Amino acid sequence: MNELDIVKKLQRLAGPVKGISLGIGDDCAIYRPRPNEELLFTADQSIEGIHFFPALAPAIIGHNALARSLSDIAAMGGEPRFCLVSLAVPSGRGAKFIDGFYRGVLALARRTGTSLAGGDLAHSDKIYCDVMVCGSAPRGKALRRSGARPGDLLCVSGRLGKPWGRRIQPRLELGRALRGRTTSCMDLSDGLALDLHRLALASGVAARVDRVPLARGATLERAVHGGEDYELLFTLPSRSAPPRGTTVIGNIIEGRAGVVMFRGKPLPARGYDHFTEG
Amino acid sequence: MNELDIVKKLQRLAGPVKGISLGIGDDCAIYRPRPNEELLFTADQSIEGIHFFPALAPAIIGHNALARSLSDIAAMGGEPRFCLVSLAVPSGRGAKFIDGFYRGVLALARRTGTSLAGGDLAHSDKIYCDVMVCGSAPRGKALRRSGARPGDLLCVSGRLGKPWGRRIQPRLELGRALRGRTTSCMDLSDGLALDLHRLALASGVAARVDRVPLARGATLERAVHGGEDYELLFTLPSRSAPPRGTTVIGNIIEGRAGVVMFRGKPLPARGYDHFTEG
């Protein structure tokens, strides 16, 4: 199988690409924006030994590689439009891995209305991939990290501290349902402690956490400082009712920007940060 | 230096981002399309040991990582708008490498009007990066691979067989100047033989090459089968004058789709294909 064969196969598997007037097989994919839409862009890497272990089924590796980027689209309240998937694999794992990987990508892509519009293929020592997703939101309606105000309710979807290696479920429906209702929103990729610190910093506020909904079998340490939950963390004006399936875990408070209090004590902004040594 | 520090530094270096209403530091970058524009998307990987050797200066690695994707925008006649840069580096090469790399990226980005809108940072065993570029073209005006017709002149820009490790210069001005003049266009990333085969296949035609403009010190083998030239390969209606700085190297002919004849003999479609073994 050479690159042309793989590209031809992907063209067939990807099917007709909604909204994409030119997809896989030319130098670029072409997208025609619709009137009044605002486009959201995110890219996330998935690296063997860092984000997953090579024993994980290729279809789950592919699913999660796309799911990580879709989670960012969910966090902004967007609808996914298309993705570009860049993949590098060791030559020894060639065709079979690529097949399983793209089956995982395409099953989730289909379910979420995301077209596979292109990408890049290469060889490397380890499995490496990077998925760019373009999403869409009505002009001015995308959710941001920066609008939380003292008094707001602090909420999360689902439960925290979930095991790694499962299929990540991006909260796309919830994200869209939150448009016009939240004051701020982001997804939990690096753990509640670090991500809430980031949200509070971006909003120029402090936050107080009173309780954390634990996943089955999770420790509190993992739920607070572990990564890869891909739930939504968001704030609502104080009198709002939190949507079904979400939990109020605390409040936004006055204080030094970025400070997070957990049951009365400051919570260190420690979680999954690739660039903190030690 | 942790991820927040790096992101803050990049926000400062990237400066105000033209056309991007929300850039580095939220879950997604936001782009507001302009009326009547068509958006072009491409992603290209640059991997240590495959696309470059680690001894290469970090600024050149960064420059070339962006230049590879800009070359695809040039091939479609687009103007670059913004890029997302995903980078993974070994922890031992951390801050200093990242600094040099982004200096290289940002210098070329500034010169070509490309905003750095976001991306992803991670650790890995080797240097790995993937650059997505979004470009823009007036609706319906993007150049494609698929319009070459028998009788057309076959042209390339510049000279072929250039040494690796130099700073790649994407042919953005030429690409824009070719809008409305070419019948097909692509960039030469994997060598003339393989890329011309792809163009001919996409257009459903054959091609004949009579001469090849050699770079200083290049062998004919390297000019025909080597990769990384990043010149434009394009076809013009037969009575056109080729633009300054480009050379007529042959013609489009009738024949089996994808066949390339070189000085009377079929040229094997062999070049830099990551997925051909041996």
Image: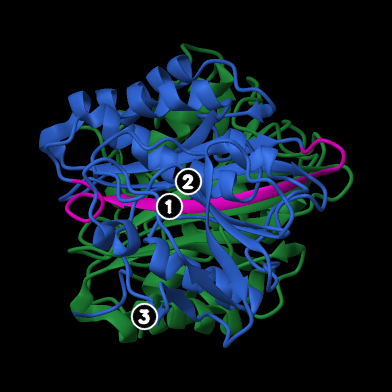
Chain colours: A blue, B green
Q: Which residues are magenta?
A: A33-52
In the shown orientation, is residue A213 left or right of residue A221? Answer: right
Residues marked 2 and 1 touching at CB (< 8 Å): yes
Q: CA distance from mark 3 to mark 1?
A: 18 Å
**Within 10 Å of the Cα at label 2, are there few (<14), some (14-19), or many (20+) other Cα atoms?**
many
Viewer-nearest residue: A246 or A140: A246
Q: Is residue B110 magenta?
A: no
The residue type indicated by label 1 comes to Asp
Question: Which mark is drawn over residue B2?
Answer: 3
Residue B261 in the image: above or below residue A214: above
Q: Disc 2 designates what residue?
A: A69
Q: Disc 1 designates what residue?
A: A44
Task: Name which residue lies at 30% across and 69% down.
Answer: A274
Q: Position of residue A130 (x, y in %)?
A: 39, 48
Task: Name which residue lies at 39% across and 83% down.
Answer: B100
Tell me the element at label 3: loop
Q: Position of residue A139 (x, y in %)?
A: 82, 48
The residue type indicated by label 3 comes to Asn
